[in-house]
Image (cartoon, rainbow, N blue to C red):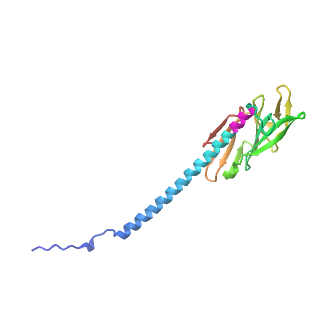
Amino acid sequence: MICLKNNNKNKQGFNIVEIVVVVAISAALLGSLGISAYYFQRNSLNIEQIGQELASEIRVLQSKILAVQDVNGSIPKAIVIELKSGQDVVTHYIRYSGGTCNYYHSQNMDILNKLENIIISPAASVYISYISPSADFVATSSTLKPSFIYRASDRSCNPTGSVIPSGLITINLNNGSQDYYVKIDAKNGSVTPTPNL
């Protein structure tokens, strides 16, 4: 009679403990990659939302000046959006009273508290003015808020200062790991939010 001897000692393989350890390590690595991808995607959507909201708010301000809406008890002759690198976006309202054009109301847009930084170009300080009733748009660069002079021909208040004649004004929104851009055409004031520079 022939006896077959079962010799498992010479076979090479993995025992159940080794397999469980490998599966656990693989699951932990895949989980951490998934969490990183989730947070990156969430931050990406968050900064895009902030950029879209800023562009929308600028468009609302354009509409507000064209619709000649009352703001704090007075109809503004101009709305100025103050853009400064490293500072929050501020809206100023200009009215004509007592023979002069002057600032009468300011409002912070509270964007910087949602971001790491805001970078403005082509200059560190840009003032965007939407003017009523002429529907003019003027972009100026200066370290100080522009002065306004009254133009009797169309009863409007117009900014003084170094006018940016053409090109793009870029608002770079940064959340620490990503950038999103809001571009404003210096010639006509059109606003375009975009993830690309």
Q: Which residue lies furthest to the left in this view?
A: 1
Q: Residue furthest top?
A: 153
Quadrant, the C terminus: top right
Task: Identify the residue shown where x is 21% and y is 73%.
Answer: 6
Range of residues picked out in magenta:
58-65
Hey, which quadrant is residue 77 in on the image? Answer: top right
Residue 107 point in image, percent of width and height? 76, 45
Decide whether the magenta segment is chiefly helix, strand or loop.
Answer: helix
Residue 45 point in image, percent of width and height? 58, 47
Question: Image check: 188 left or right of 7?
Answer: right
Query: Is the residue 76 above or below the residue 176 in the image?
Result: above
Q: Residue furthest right?
A: 98
Task: Identify the residue shown where x is 27% and y is 74%.
Answer: 9
Residue 195 point in image, percent of width and height? 60, 43
Pick the residue in front: 37 or 102.
102
Task: Identify the residue shown where x is 68% and y is 40%.
Answer: 57
Pick the residue in front: 69 or 110.
69
Query: Is the residue 56 above or below the residue 67 in the image?
Result: below
Quadrant, the N terminus: bottom left
Question: Image check: 38 left or right of 138?
Answer: left
Question: Image check: 173 left or right of 96?
Answer: left
Task: Identify the residue shown where x is 84% and y is 25%.
Answer: 153
Check if residue 172 falls in the magenta segment: no
Hey, which quadrant is residue 99 in on the image? Answer: top right
Is residue 43 visible in the rendered image? The answer is: yes
Is residue 168 visible in the rendered image? The answer is: no
Question: Image check: 16 left or right of 39?
Answer: left
